[in-house]
Image: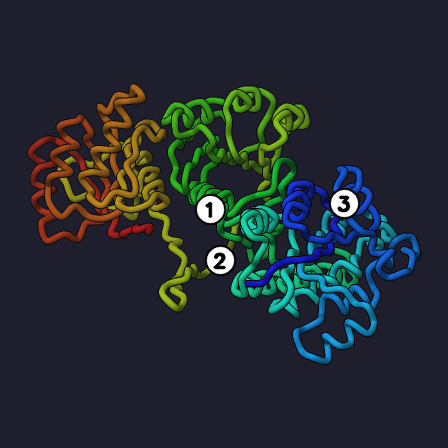
């Protein structure tokens, strides 16, 4: 464990700095700072020392040169070797155990300005140098390179103000990722005057945290090609998973009609296809207005003021649409934390990867979309045109729902769903119970299953609840039992021939 006795703080964003500084002062840590950071911390009544007093050299060139000095970098790069200790004494170089840096907002300036001089001025030199030096000497120095790391640091320091080597090494890794991404954005601008134009290099986007607050998170890819965030707080790891699920389902619902989706925890809990977007939203919401609270809302059409007025009544995390009318956007922006996203294009990934054990699993993307002509009618009764459309919609919904899953659809509206169950019967019962809870009539409804029925029990439960048309992959050795029951009870059933497990 390494005890922190001194810290250098140089940040553009001052959020949570007061709390961090108070923890340091409570543990008798000496704080060095400069420029606006010094003025801010000093205004809080917290005792600290100017870097200029340490270096005996003023901040020059309009503040562009403040920390670039041997006493600063010597203090950061000093090791425990005898020669380093001797030289530090000789030249009066202090120990600096903690470096906290938040870089000039180059990327934000690039997004909000076309002024070349302003953009170049926001290239941080001293800050990125401090990060690299502190990360290199992680055995002795704790390097904080992002405001998203403050909370974890505060929790670690509040007891004994010590950090362990594994934590410092992870911070060093994240620091060099930050440095690499920062340099890439600058080089892209100077080369193309537009980040991501004519380039396939992935960005590394820091997230507020991972799946939980104690986990760090980042997105590696080209997110700006898919959507533009036009309002709200920073997008989180979980937001991105929900956005991915929502966009995936929207992509498969190819229709000129109005589509509205509501997702929660990567699963669709509201789906409706209607002649106008307002009806689509209201019917999607009625599918499960409880789960919709804090959900992800997605539309395939521009949001106008009438739809925005209804959406504005609901607490939601993210709203995705291809466009927004000006007055709709003004209304929706009334809540500062709402994430509003303009969808630009669909992902075109060919493969899906995830970590597994001490390696990576990779598979082809499940890009199979069934149409009714792909289904095989296996019962004496064939679905009519209304049920045909509902069966297709239900089959697409289960493709995008966690297994084991069941989706119940009626008149192009999801009216019940069961998801993530270890038993298909449990998934079916959950879907039926939710449908009844929200007041839907199951009579003449359609059901889809992501995998085959090993027995006829699910068909029997469906019949008992007036569900009379089913789509499932087929392939069980007891398929005939389900077919016979359907024929006996005047139900229609089709086989898709495709299983859509989603784990």
State the image coordinates of residue 69 (x, y, percent, origin top left): 84, 65
- 91 relative to 469, above or below: below
Query: Does residue 223 appear left or right of residue 72 in this picture?
Result: left
Q: Are marks 2 and 1 in contact (CB under 8 Å)?
A: no
In the foreground, 303 or 426: 426
Distance (Cα) linking label 2 and label 1: 26 Å
| Label 3 crowd bin: few (<14), some (14–19), many (20+), radius 10 Å | some
Query: Does residue 84 appear left or right of residue 27 in this picture?
Result: right
Q: Secondary structure at mark 1?
A: loop
| Label 2 crowd bin: few (<14), some (14–19), many (20+), radius 10 Å | few
Distance (Cα) linking label 3 and label 2: 53 Å
State the image coordinates of residue 312 (x, y, percent, origin top left): 55, 23
Instruction: Looking at the image, tell me whether mark 2 or mark 1 is earlier in sequence order.
Output: 1
Query: Based on the displayed image, in which of its 4 quarters is residue 420 positioned?
Result: top left
Q: Which residue is mark 2?
A: 349
Question: How many numbered marks appear?
Answer: 3
Q: Which residue is mark 3?
A: 47
Numbered badge on residue 49: none
Q: Which residue is mark 1?
A: 212
| Label 1 crowd bin: few (<14), some (14–19), many (20+), radius 10 Å | few
Distance (Cα) linking label 3 and label 1: 34 Å
Of badges 2 and 1, nearer the viewer stands: 1
In the foreground, 190 or 258: 190
Which residue does the image show at 31% across and 38% down from the upper left? 394
Instruction: Looking at the image, tell me whether mark 3 or mark 1 is earlier in sequence order.
Output: 3
Which residue does the image show at 42% across and 37% down from the upper left? 264
């Amino acid at each position: 464990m390494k005890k922190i006795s001194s810290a250098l703080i140089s940040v553009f964003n001052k959020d949570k700095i007061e709390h961090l500084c108070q923890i340091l002062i409570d543990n008798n840590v000496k704080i060095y700072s400069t420029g606006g950071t010094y003025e801010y911390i000093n205004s809080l009544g917290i005792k600290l020392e100017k870097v200029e007093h340490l270096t005996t050299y003023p901040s020059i060139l309009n503040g562009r040169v403040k920390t670039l000095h041997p006493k600063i970098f010597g203090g950061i790069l000093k090791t425990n070797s005898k020669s380093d200790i001797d030289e530090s004494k000789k030249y009066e170089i202090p120990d600096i155990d903690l470096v906290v840096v938040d870089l000039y907002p180059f990327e934000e300036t690039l997004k909000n300005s076309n002024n070349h001089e302003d953009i170049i001025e926001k290239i941080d030199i001293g800050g990125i140098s401090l990060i690299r030096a502190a990360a290199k000497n992680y055995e002795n120095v704790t390097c904080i390179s992002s405001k998203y790391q403050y909370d974890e640091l505060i929790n670690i320091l509040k007891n004994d103000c010590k950090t362990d080597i594994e934590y410092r090494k992870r911070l060093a890794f994240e620091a060099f990722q930050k440095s690499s991404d920062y340099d890439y954005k600058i080089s892209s601008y100077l080369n193309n005057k537009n980040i991501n134009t004519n380039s396939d290099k992935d960005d590394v986007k820091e997230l507020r945290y991972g799946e939980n607050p104690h986990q760090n998170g980042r997105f590696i890819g080209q997110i700006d090609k898919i959507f533009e965030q036009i309002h709200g707080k920073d997008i989180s790891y979980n937001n991105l998973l929900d956005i991915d699920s929502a966009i995936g389902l929207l992509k498969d619902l190819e229709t000129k009609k109005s589509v509205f989706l509501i997702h929660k925890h990567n699963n669709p809990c509201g789906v409706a296809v209607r002649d106008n977007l307002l009806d689509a939203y209201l019917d999607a919401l009625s599918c499960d207005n409880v789960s919709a609270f804090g959900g992800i809302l997605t539309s395939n059409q521009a949001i106008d003021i009438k739809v925005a007025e209804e959406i504005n009544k609901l607490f939601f995390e993210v709203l995705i649409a291809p466009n927004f009318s000006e007055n709709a956007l003004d209304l929706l922006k009334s809540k500062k934390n709402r994430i509003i996203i303009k969808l630009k294009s669909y992902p075109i990934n060919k493969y899906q990867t995830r970590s597994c054990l001490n390696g990576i699993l990779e598979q082809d993307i499940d890009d199979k979309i069934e149409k009714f002509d792909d289904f095989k009618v296996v019962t004496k009764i064939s679905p009519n045109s209304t049920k045909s459309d509902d069966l297709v919609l239900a089959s697409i919904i289960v493709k995008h729902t966690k297994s084991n899953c069941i989706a119940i659809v009626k008149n192009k509206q999801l009216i019940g769903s069961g998801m993530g169950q270890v038993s298909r019967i449990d998934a079916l019962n959950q879907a039926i119970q939710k449908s009844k809870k929200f007041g839907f009539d199951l009579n003449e409804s359609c059901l889809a299953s992501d995998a085959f029925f090993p027995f006829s029990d699910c068909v029997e439960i469906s019949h008992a609840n007036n569900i009379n048309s089913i789509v499932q992959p087929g392939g069980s050795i007891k398929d005939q039992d389900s077919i016979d029951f359907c024929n006996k009870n005047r139900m229609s059933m089709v086989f898709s021939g495709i299983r859509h497990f989603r784990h």
